[in-house]
Amino acid sequence: MPVCSVCGRESPAGFEFCGACGARFDLEVPVLREVRKRVTVCFCDVSGSTALGERLDPESLRRMMARYFQVMRQVVERHEGTVEKFIGDAVMAVFGVPVLHEDDALRAVRAAAEMREALGELNEELERNYGTRLALRIGLDTGEVVAGTEERLVTGDAVNVAARLEQAAQPDEILVGEETLRLCRHAVEAEPLEPLALKGKSERISAYRLIAVAAGSDPVRWRLEAPMVGRERQRRLLADAWERVCLERSCQLFTLLGPAGVGKSRLASEFLAAVEDATVLRGRCLSYGEGITYWPVAEMLKQLLGVEAQARLAEFALAQAEVVALGALLGEEAGLTSTEEIAWAVRKLLETEAATRPLVCLFDDVHWGEETFFDLVEHVADLSRESPILLLCLARPELLERRPGWAGGKLNATSVLLEPLSDEECGRLIENLVGRAGLAEEVANRIAEGAEGNPLFVEEMLAMLIDDGLLVCEDGH
């Protein structure tokens, strides 16, 4: 039976329009092959819905719940999850099907927190229109599922656990499974509960109450401490680019390319730690959300200008049109401003800042950027002739698929690919992380083989051993 994407209600097969709200169905739903995937499942249900049915007439209840489902769906899809189905008053969402992201667990937790926040805003509307408020319960769990039947369903233990966690939650409470928390522990605050006895589970399940999710786009990640291994050539090229910035007072565009976890951020951190007497601004492109075109640039401007942005802009002696364009970028000025005006104003602001001391603009996850953002970065690189600015961009190789001509033909541009570590370098990294006597040679070899030269995978495998109590971490080792 088709499910309405607006109100979430099912209609008989063959219907072209929803029988509840009248919306047209998208009948061209792709059929997915059955596959095994590791996903995060989110169950969100309304608390006390039976009592609501007693207080409201059926039509009012239907309209109110349709509005609720619409808001919840919007939140899930904003974080690139999939609403799998509506079960009574419950929303079942999956993160990792059909599109897989490396941070699906964190996306699911962020979506759950935003659902709770969105309901608070929705309740103001519901109270005005229906004289009532809703409360929700949410449960999340991560695990392997079978996905891709023609009804786009996922089945597996993670589905059952997420549903049971939701049922065990109190009103307006979010309960998170152990594996979900492990995958996003760097970005969330949660408190452990007594292990729960859940229906259908022979053993008690560890669960955590979600307290908060890091608001920033770049949360501090727990990691083992070790000196950086390899990358001598790339470090030398980056140092050379910085030398040209400082000595020639020129703008340089330097792009570090490599798959997730290969060490782009670590190399950039090592470089910035050695930079002296420079202003460093950071921005990160987002893969989902609203109003994200200039997100990384706006992040940088907020770091540079502080809370009183408009007052600080006056100190830069910019033209009024440039102040208006920057205000629009920061959301503080109304009116229409073209992309060209914004790019021009950003460049003038950066040049003014760089006139006093060299400037590093670090853009992370550039592969998620939009065309307008790419144009802005290249505009600064092309037209900032005599300003000591380093535009340091970190991206996956997909950037070159989305923007084949990225930095092409520019004398002031360098792109460097970070390859996986060699077996010898992986061995040195493991030794640096756990010490010479920390792991049996066979275990170290298996980790190096499984990581396939990816430093992040090495750290994650060691972290799993620590979580399982097979390794003890002391003083960062």
Image: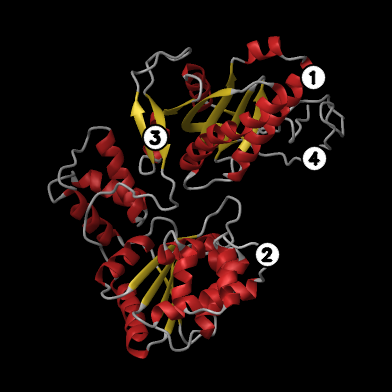
**Which amino acid is tagged 2?**
Gly
**Which amino acid is tagged 1?**
Glu
Q: Earlier in the sequence, mark 4 or mark 3?
A: 4
Give the CA separation, mark 4 to mark 3.
35 Å
Q: Residue at x 60, y 39 (%)?
A: 75
- Which one is closest to the eye, mark 4 or mark 2? 2
Label 2, secondary structure: give it.
loop
Residue picked out by circle 4: 26
Q: Earlier in the sequence, mark 3 or mark 2?
A: 3
Q: Earlier in the sequence, mark 1 or mark 4?
A: 4
Q: Is residue 73 left or right of residue 357?
A: right
Residue picked out by circle 2: 335
The percent position of residue 48, horizontal first and vertical second, equals 59, 14
The percent position of residue 93, horizontal first and vertical second, equals 59, 33
Q: Residue 306 or 26: which is nearer the viewer?
A: 306
Q: How is the image coloured?
A: secondary structure
Q: Is residue 271 left or right of residue 350?
A: left
Please identify the residue farthest to the left as the structure is shown. Answer: 437
What numbered label is drawn on residue 181? 3
- Which one is closest to the eye, mark 3 or mark 2? 2
What numbered label is drawn on residue 59? 1
**Which amino acid is tagged 4?**
Asp
Task: Characterize the local packing of mark 1: few (<14), some (14-19) or many (20 or more) Cα atoms within 10 angstroms.
Answer: few
